[in-house]
């Protein structure tokens, strides 16, 4: 809670216009002379212990009033003191609590301006050294604070065979799963070591920090933009196959709406908040705000459930601490494939959960980012659905870490988080599925049974891949374990590079390039006045999977000498003689079933600019 305490000759206010969360039966106009004006912003942290926040605030106000020798107190809600506000309901509870506590002290005349109104006010400050004071209240700091209930966490492992094992048994293994368990159990890791992808993302001219923006906001160069767009295409194709319906929703929302402010407070992530005229706004940290507003306004029949809405949220925003922002792993603006599924009931939610978790595991295979997983749920959920949890692990085909929470502290009762592991053995959280049992009530999302019963059903949150930025992060981190680093061919910014031996071979190379382009292959031609060895070497540095040299022999025979970078049973790049059709077939086999986009950079390397 933030307090601004002003010793005034006079303060008066007039409530002029309601907002959606305006208090009813409010005193529309009032004033006090020789008063302590208490401008107050109730913050989200106060919701953890409103009683103690009220107690501390009242003590500060009483102490200040007595020090100033005044008995008149005006409490004035003033959201502008903070960018991390509590829900309107919590704010009103706190403000009323302060008013009642001060009134109960005796000897004070206490008035309170109404919450949730646009108000005009005038104030005359006395101007002495103690006339303007500020205070920050943190609940729990006071001696009489009510202790916060401690949540117990229990960890163990379920194997696909249904065995329950001690999680600590896996810690000594040198495996990605062991790395995940160490992180979850709190073992020390390689903190402070810069991830290898940070250098790679710049060296490969994919993405760069934008110094003229906020921390954690990036500029994407053509090669990185292509990969990012293709990954978005990949998720869209999978979601459409699954029956998801794409939508697009706003990036900012009005905190005066009770459902918006409550959901923002429940999520607990750091938020971007700002003023738009007289309105307190926030930038979304996920697509759920727009999805839930859309569902609220829909005419929902049980026959249409499960109902799946999908958005590639470009962007979502989280105001992460500056010291935590790093590369593509933790950002303040990111691209999140976000699907929300309105289910008929819990059984329907469990069935959809299995399907969507399978999508997450499959994304790890398709994107060549091996994943490990943890399943989290409340004790009540586990006691009721333990056989289902075992079945979920069996269908996943790999051991999963299980975390049991003694009580529900979030909007979800169960969730699965899948993660890749970076080169330092640290998890990169990617796909997730969650069963939300609060938001349908909060946003009044409902359907009616044939008998007319109103149902607020469970909602699944799912990101089939996790944020696009973290997928690229995981790919780049994964190259540390590759003998020959590369992207999957369908994601390679250039799939085939043609290298003419001499200037006289450029025209023939352009003819081949035109045919490869027509066949749906991203191809460029290195027409620079450089040696063949240098051109081939730089193609390798660009991670081009197929590099075809074109000289007199190739022009005469029509067969190309191709350096193949993508490995199969071979341990290093190798040369192979191919016809054009064989080269096309090789690329098509490696890219089958994946989306395609054309080249984002100039076809001729002599025309290609450097970005870094």
Image (tube, grey):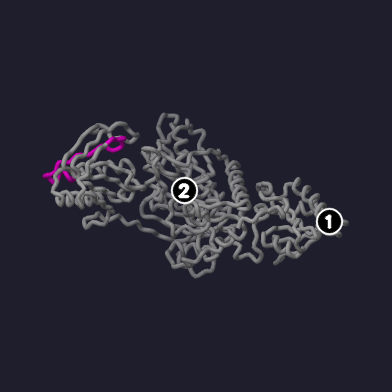
Mark whose residue sits in front, 1 or 2: 1
Relative to 261, residue 427 above or below: below
Give the residues drawn in magenta, as a range. 100-120
Dot 2 surroundings within 10 Å: few (below 14), some, or many (20 or more)? many
- N-terminal of the pair, mark 1 or mark 2, is 2
Quarter holding residue 499: bottom right
Q: Which of the two residues, 90 or 195, is positioned nearer the viewer here?
A: 195
- Find residue 142 and report its horizontal and vertical position in percent: 23, 56
Q: Which residue is mark 1?
A: 504
Mark 1 secondary-structure assignment = helix
Q: Is residue 262 visible?
A: yes
Q: Which residue is mark 2?
A: 317
Is residue 542 found inside the magenta-colored segment of the image?
Answer: no
Membership of 113 in magenta stretch: yes
Pick out the residue farthest to the right.
556
User: Where is residue 373 shown, x and y percent of the image?
Assistant: 51, 57
Residue at position x 65%, y 66% in the image: 483
In this picture, is 164 found above or below 389? Answer: below
* Depth check, front residue: 27 or 235: 27
Q: Is residue 124 left or right of residue 329?
A: left
User: In the displayed image of the protein, which residue is found farthest to the bottom?
Assistant: 172
- Per the image, label 2 sits on a secondary structure element best described as strand
Which quadrant would the C terminus be assigned to in this image?
bottom right
Measured Cα–Cα span from mark 1 to mark 2: 53 Å
- Image coordinates for residue 566, horizontal then vertical, percent: 70, 60
Mark 1 Cα within 10 Å, few/some/many (few <14, many 20+)? Answer: few
User: Residue 448: x and y, percent?
Assistant: 43, 31
Q: Quadrant of residue 38?
A: top left
């Amino acid at each position: 809670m933030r307090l601004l305490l002003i010793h005034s000759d006079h303060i008066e206010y007039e409530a002029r216009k309601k907002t959606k969360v305006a208090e009813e039966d409010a005193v529309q106009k009032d004033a006090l002379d020789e008063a302590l004006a208490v401008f107050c912003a109730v913050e989200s942290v106060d919701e953890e212990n409103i009683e103690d926040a009220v107690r501390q605030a009242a003590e500060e106000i009483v102490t200040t009033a007595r020090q100033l020798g005044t008995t008149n107190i005006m409490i004035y809600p003033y959201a502008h003191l903070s960018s991390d506000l509590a829900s309107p309901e919590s704010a009103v509870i706190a403000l009323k609590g302060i008013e009642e506590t001060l009134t109960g002290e005796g000897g004070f005349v206490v008035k309170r301006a109404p919450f949730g109104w646009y108000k005009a006010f005038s104030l005359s400050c006395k101007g002495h050294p103690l006339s303007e004071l500020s205070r920050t209240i943190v609940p729990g700091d006071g001696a009489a604070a009510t202790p916060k209930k401690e949540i117990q966490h229990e960890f163990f492992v379920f194997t696909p065979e249904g065995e329950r094992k001690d999680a600590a048994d896996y810690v000594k293994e040198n495996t990605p799963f062991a790395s995940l368990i160490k992180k979850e159990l709190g073992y020390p890791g390689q903190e402070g070591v810069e991830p290898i992808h940070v250098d790679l993302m710049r060296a490969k001219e994919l993405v760069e920090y934008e110094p003229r923006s906020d921390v954690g906001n990036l500029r994407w160069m053509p090669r990185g933009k292509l990969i990012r767009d293709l990954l978005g295409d990949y998720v869209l194709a999978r979601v459409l196959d699954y029956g998801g319906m794409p939508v697009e929703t706003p990036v900012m929302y009005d905190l005066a709406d009770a459902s918006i402010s409550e959901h923002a407070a429940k999520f607990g992530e750091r938020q971007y908040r700002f003023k738009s005229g007289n309105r307190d706004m926030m930038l979304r940290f996920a697509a759920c705000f727009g999805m839930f507003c859309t569902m609220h306004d829909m005419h929902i029949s049980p026959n249409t459930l499960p109902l799946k809405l999908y958005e590639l949220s470009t962007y979502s925003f989280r105001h992460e601490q500056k010291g935590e922002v790093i590369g593509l792993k933790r950002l303040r603006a990111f691209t999140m494939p976000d699907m929300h599924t309105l289910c008929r009931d819990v059984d329907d939610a469990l069935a959809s959960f299995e399907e969507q978790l399978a999508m997450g595991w499959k994304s790890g295979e398709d994107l060549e980012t091996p994943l490990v997983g943890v399943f989290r749920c409340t004790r009540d959920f586990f006691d009721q659905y333990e056989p289902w949890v075992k079945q979920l692990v069996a269908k996943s085909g790999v051991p999963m870490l299980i975390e049991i929470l003694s009580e529900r502290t979030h909007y979800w009762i169960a969730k699965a988080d899948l993660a890749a592991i970076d080169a330092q053995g640290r998890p990169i959280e990617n796909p997730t599925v969650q069963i939300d049992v609060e938001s349908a009530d909060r946003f009044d999302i409902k359907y009616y049974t044939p008998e007319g019963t109103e149902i607020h059903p469970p909602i699944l949150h799912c990101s089939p891949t996790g944020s696009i930025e973290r997928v690229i992060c995981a790919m780049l981190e994964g190259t540390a374990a590759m003998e020959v680093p590369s992207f999957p061919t369908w994601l390679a910014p250039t799939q085939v590079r043609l290298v003419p031996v001499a200037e006289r071979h450029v025209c023939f190379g352009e003819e081949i390039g035109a045919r490869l382009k027509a066949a749906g292959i991203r191809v460029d031609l290195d027409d620079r006045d450089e040696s063949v060895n240098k051109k081939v070497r730089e193609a390798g540095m660009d991670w081009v999977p197929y590099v075809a040299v074109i000289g007199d022999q190739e022009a005469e025979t029509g067969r190309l000498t191709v350096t193949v970078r993508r490995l199969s049973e071979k341990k290093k790049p190798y040369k192979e003689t191919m016809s054009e059709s064989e080269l096309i077939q090789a690329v098509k086999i490696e890219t089958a079933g994946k989306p395609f986009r054309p080249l984002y950079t100039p076809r001729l390397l002599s025309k290609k600019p450097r970005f870094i």
